[in-house]
Image (spheres, coloured by chain):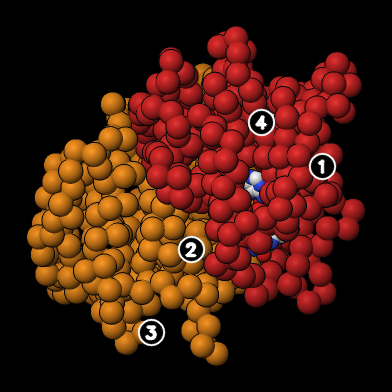
Amino acid sequence: MKFLVCISNVPDTTTKITFTPDNKEFNKAGVQFVINPWDEYALTRAIELKEAQGSGTVTVLNVGEADTEPNIRKALAIGADDAIRVNAAPKDAWFVAQQIAHYAKEGGYDVILMGKESIDYNGFQVHGMVGELLGIPTVAPAMKLDMSGNTATLEREIEGGKEIVEVNTPFVASCQQPMCEPRIPNMRGIMTARTKPLKVVEAVGEGAATAVAEYQLPPKKQGVKLIDAANAGELIKLLRNEAKVI
Amino acid sequence: MSVLVVVECDKGEVKKSSLEVASYGAQVAQMLGTTATAVAVGEATEANLAQLGEQGISKVLFDNEPRLKDFVNGAYTKLIAAAADKEQAKVIVLANSNIGASVGSRLAVRLKASLATNVVELPKTDGGQFTVKRGAFSGKAFADVVLSGERKIIAVKKNSIEAQHNGGQTAQVESFSAQLSDADFADAPKQVIMQDQAGGILLPEADKVVSGGRGMKGPENWHLIEDLAKALGAATACSKPVSDVDWRPHHEHVGQTGITVSPNLYIACGISGAIQHLAGVNSSKVIVVINKDPEAPFFKAADYGIVGDVFEVLPKLTQAVKELN
Ligand SMILES: Cc1cc2nc3c(=O)[nH]c(=O)nc-3n(C[C@H](O)[C@H](O)[C@H](O)COP(=O)(O)OP(=O)(O)OC[C@H]3O[C@@H](n4cnc5c(N)ncnc54)[C@H](O)[C@@H]3O)c2cc1C
Ligand SMILES: Cc1cc2nc3c(=O)[nH]c(=O)nc-3n(C[C@H](O)[C@H](O)[C@H](O)COP(=O)(O)OP(=O)(O)OC[C@H]3O[C@@H](n4cnc5c(N)ncnc54)[C@H](O)[C@@H]3O)c2cc1C
């Protein structure tokens, strides 16, 4: 079975977010970029399923400029077989989805796995768009994925519960915990990753459907008002009379 | 031309987040000089749908197909697309829920629309541009996004818009058929399993949340969290390590890798306030932190704080709430 895992290159979860002086772009200076944490679930689960099937391939795909290659290599070190980088700045979800749909179709993949959402842009939309572009189901977000032949059984999280869904290949799923325990690269993986194929291709399709006019940081908190532990009940009065939230 | 709002219903009731969506849609309609029509998904009743008039909805399209009770991506997308065409909707508003965003992203492609998820404010339409503010960088920033497509789809973040209640107004409920066939239900769930919600309050919808971390020491102490939550009418939540070791179920875990919540009140008990935890809660209106360590980073993000032992403080708070009621 051919697995395609889409990975996004995002600022490390502990990054302090700042913008360029005109507030039009994220300030990348000094920022460490990582594989989007949700995408690590997709990658590890694809590798596990391939191993269980005893055959097949796992390809990772990223839409990004050359600076994402260290994280693509990391995905190869974790256990993907080969990689595709669509050489373009990811302008928005629609742009990214068109690239993924095009190269997924070209490669004839059976299972397309993504993360639940990117932790930078928090879109939760690329997977739905890719499913629609390819005319196949998308299951988002999936907490569990098992395969038997060409049929997948997934648990999809919905507000307040979960659904058990069955779909046949080809399909798209976006992954989240507790699907698997994401793997980290070992020494052998890091060595072999250097020589695994990484193909760079050009962007296709239309441009973006949205554009960011300006970024803002949230307003600063006033500072914490401390209440003496011995007098804890006072807090409840403040929540009612001052904050007016209870 | 009108504004189309998608309302999610559960056990006959319109979800709270969908009342917010309806209010949002009605206000957008007013800005654009048109009316707002709703289309219902999930298990709805005509009587409850008619009450959407209180949120400013003039008409509700209702397909009485019983299989729409559960979330089916294919069928929901087709239904809403048909409603959008019937109403010639230029703006479609949904909840930023797993259902809303899943359907919204398919619709964006099908209707060739510009989509913004995680939207926190009404749009701005000055200068001939349609701009919405959305949360980005996991609660650490906002982005003003210009939607350039002729059609626009907006998924509204929960608890960011106040639901309006104009008493006495009713919406006209109109039966509507999208002519759904078996093929549209191909991805129907085999089974739907709903969780037991503590006190019946759904965490993603809750406007008050009491949350516990490792400082609670063990699952046997969770009655302290539950008692306060019950007294306040709040949902319960926890930090990641707590669900990792199964003190609490995974669906209660909030943060960057869990659920994002934005209640009016978030009370953190024995949680240190790691940046990944804050990412899931930092858009809460009022944050209260109870921690025995005065240096705990969470105090920096808090509005109110008590430096103290949760085992002593929590029962006092529960008692004070009971006295207040
Ligand atoms: C600093 C910075 C600024 C950005 N500014 C903008 C901006 O102004 N406007 C804008 O629209 N986008 C911007 N992006 C791009 C954004 O990160 C995405 O690549 C794209 O917009 C999709 O994001 P999303 O949150 O909608 O994806 P989601 O729908 O949340 O992503 C779901 C899944 O899709 C896959 N995926 C997402 N992106 C990619 C990718 N590039 N390659 C491969 N797979 C992917 C992953 O599996 C991911 O888990 C910016 C990114 C960065 C790092
Ligand atoms: C990629 C990544 C993603 C992550 N995602 C998430 C996420 O989504 N959500 C999340 O929560 N975490 C997440 N984490 C983990 C996060 O970094 C922290 O480790 C975690 O939030 C800590 O949980 P905690 O506050 O319960 O425990 P601790 O950090 O151990 O804090 C316990 C606190 O309790 C206090 N305490 C102890 N005893 C008492 C007492 N008797 N009375 C009062 N206070 C007491 C202590 O002073 C301490 O501050 C993630 C980490 C990574 C690397």
Measure how far apart labels 1 and 2 are at the Cα level.
29 Å
Residue indicated by mark 4: A59
Query: What hue represents chain A?
Result: red
Q: Do labels 4 and 2 share a chain?
A: no
Residue A69 is tagged as 1
Residue type pointed to by label 2: Leu
Q: Nearer the viewer, mark 3 or mark 2?
A: 2
Identify which residue, B72 or A203, lies in the foreground: A203
Tag 1: Cα neighbours inside 10 Å, few (<14), some, or many (≥20)?
A: some
Chain letter of mark 1 equals: A
Kindly give the residue lying farthest to the bottom in the view shown: B127
> Splitting the image into 4 quarters, where does residue B255 fall?
top right
Instruction: Tell me: is circle 2 under 8 Å from ligand 1.
Output: no
Residue drawn at the location 55% of the way across and 58% of the way down: A94
Mark 2 = which residue?
B115
Estimate the spatial distance between the alpha carbons at disc 3 and disc 1, rounded to whole Å. 46 Å
Q: Where is residue A153 in the image (x, y as percent from the top left)?
A: 40, 22
Asked whether the beta carbons under mark 3 and mark 1 sit within 8 Å of each other, the answer is no
Q: In terms of secondary structure, where does tag 1 sit? A: helix
Q: Does the residue labelled 3 lie within 8 Å of ligand 1?
A: no
The residue identified by callout 3 is B31
| Marks 1, 2: nearer the viewer | 1
Helix, strand, or loop for circle 2?
strand
State the separation of the CA atoms marked 3 and 4: 47 Å
- Asked whether residue A234 appears in the rendered view, the answer is no
Q: Is residue A159 left or right of residue B79?
A: right
**Can you tell which of label 1 and label 4 is closer to the viewer?**
4
Circle 3 crowding by C-alpha within 10 Å: few under 14, some 14–19, many from 20: some
Chain for numbered disc 2: B
